Amino acid sequence: MSIYFENRQKQKVDLRRLRASLKKILAELACSDADVSVIFVSDEEIRGLNRKYLARDRATNVISFSMREGEFFDVNPSLLGDIVISVDTALRDAEREGIPLEDEMTYLMIHGVLHLLGYDHERSGRDAAREMEGIQNDLFVRLKGYPLDR
C-alpha cells in the first residue's frame, strides 16, 4: 500500500491522523494493498479542476480521478487513483454540521475512495446513489462512532 498526501493550501491539516483514517477506510473496503493519493487544495484550485475536467464552473468539496477506468486500467491494479479535497469547502461544511474538520475530511475521503472503486451517485440512478450513500454513512459510523445527519 502506498498513500501519498499533499497539502497545497494554507489551512493546517493533521496529515498523520488523516493518513491513519485513510488506511482504515481502505482496510474496511478490502483495499489494504491499494495505492491512493489525496491532495488538499483551496476552493480556487478545485474550481479550476472541476471546470477543466467536469465542465462545472464552481468549487466543490471532493473530486476523484480513478485509475480503474479507461484503456490501461489493468497496468497497475493496485493503483486506485487520486482524491482532491477542498479544505475551504470542507471547513464550511464541518462548521455547518458542527463536526471537527478532520471528521468531515474523513467523510470526503470515504466518498472519494468509493468513487475510485466505481461507485457513482450522479449518473447511475437513484438505487446506486442510495447504495453509495449507505456504504459511506455506515463506514463513517464504524470509523468515527457517530452518524452524520445528511
Image: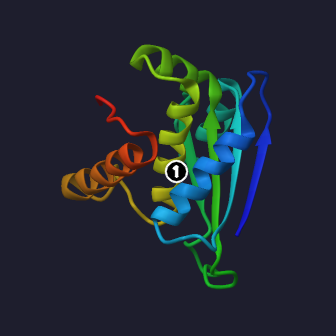
67 is higher (above) or lower (below) than 84:
below
Inspect the image, locate mark 1, and give the three-letter code of the amino acid beneath it: Gly
Quadrant location of the C terminus in the rendered image: top left
**Front residue of this view, candidates 122 and 118:** 118
- Which residue sits at x=38%, y=56%? 120
Q: Residues within 10 Å of mark 1 (few under 14, many from 20)?
A: many
Left-right relation of 128 to 136:
left
Left-right relation of 131 to 57:
left
Q: Quadrant of residue 85?
A: top right
Quadrant location of the N terminus in the rendered image: bottom right
**Front residue of this view, candidates 83 and 30:** 30
Give how far across and how far down residue 26 sits, in percent. Answer: 54, 62
Give how far across and how far down residue 39 sits, in percent. Answer: 71, 43
Give how far across and how far down residue 15 sits, in percent. Answer: 73, 40
Q: Is residue 55 visible?
A: no
**Front residue of this view, candidates 48 and 4:** 4
